[in-house]
Amino acid sequence: MEESSTKSEPIATESKIPAAVVSCTGAELQPLVGAHDQNLRLIEERLGVEIVPRGEQLQVYGGGEAAQATQQLLNQLLAVIRQGRGLTDSDVHYALQATKRDAGEDAEALLSEPIIVTHRGKPIRPCTAGQVEYVQAIAECDVVFCIGPAGTGKTYLAMAMAVSAMREGRVSRIVLTRPLVEAGEELGFLPGDIMDKVDPYLRPLHDALHDIMGADRFHRHLSRGSIEVVPLAYMRGRTINDAFIVLDEAQNTTPGQAKMALTRMGLGSRMIVTGDITQTDLPATATSGLVHAIQVLEGVPGIRVCRMTGNDIVRHSLVQRIVSAYDKAEKQSSPEGASNEQP
């Protein structure tokens, strides 16, 4: 590859003029380069340039376009540091991804305000342009649909927005629900009372709230009823006022279940509906309630639909490649598209 040839023949920086220069203070330089210059080494490897610290400057050597992209990336990371934030490995990783895709909006997402700070002091903020659009839609609309592949932060960001709304007093409680559909396995009878039986299905929602609020605070809210985590079947007949409602894994609802859930909203409530329509666990002949709801409701005032893509995946970088490979294989095996093709 071209990048490897760049690294195998080091640029003679002593006798060359740098293609780009980034200026910073001594206090900004250390977090920018990272421990043992790890940030610089990663940027050099990914963008095929050489970066040399000289005084309060970072001199960039390499091809014109690569050097300009590196300069832009370093300035974006400097802006993060100048906000008073610590520069994390994730910040560098997401900024690099955005730079390689030439997606300036994704890099600008690093400068967005945090939605909430977790009980461990970690700020939660959107990391991609798609996530920024999603968070803005939640802030502006009473009903938001978010569809996209695994790892795009659909559920986690919804939880963060819900907890933020309750902390700020905009709602008095959070109601989290999902359909109880097994992912291709028959689990049989489970021991315990009804909540013990449904707990494995609702565990991902518990895990997200544990991470954001802390287990002790989450269980206190749970015991007081200010947070409810319930199976979708238990929502029938209810009117839920002054609440933040999250319907997760909605691709596994039927059209009737989706309609039932959406009509539970009472005064002062808002709802987020999330799902990945490429991972539907319904019978092959069944129509996904999420797909049907979007087809019926998109364009209705007060309702927004956000579509995440593989570019919004914020898990391990390999997840993005896995999703892309599956998408490619599915298109090759079913050129006309499946019945639950993304609306």
Image: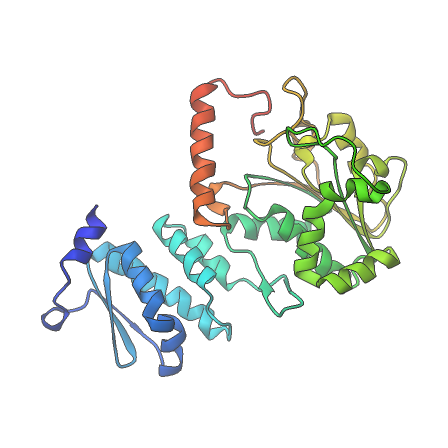
Instruction: Decide if residue 168 is in sight here.
Output: no
Q: Provide residue 317's location: percent of width, then percent of height.
A: 44, 48
Query: Can see residue 261?
Result: yes
Q: Is residue 25 left or right of residue 330?
A: left
Residue drawn 36% across and 81% down? Answer: 25
Q: Is the residue 187 above or below the residue 16 in the image?
A: above
Question: Where in the figure is residue 337, as x and y percent of width and height?
Answer: 51, 21
Q: Quadrant of the C terminus?
A: top right
Vertical order, 7 against 241 (above or below): below
Q: Residue at x 42, y 22 (%)?
A: 332
Q: What is the quadrant of residue 308 in the picture?
A: top right
Taking depth in this image into account, of 216 and 284 the one nearest to the observer is 216
Tell me the residue at 70%/56% (across/down): 209
Most extreme residue toward the front, as rendered?
191
- Which color scheme does this rendered protein use? rainbow
Q: Please report the residue visible at 62 percent of the width from the left and 29 percent of the height from the top.
A: 280
Position in image of residue 105 (x %, y %): 45, 53
Q: Residue furthest left?
A: 15
* Quadrant in which residue 303 is drawn: top right
Q: Position of residue 273 (x, y in %)?
A: 69, 41
Q: With respect to residue 157, does 251 lie above or below?
A: above
Q: Residue 92 is drawn in which quadrant?
A: bottom left
Q: How many marks?
A: 0
| Quadrant location of the N terminus in the rendered image | top left
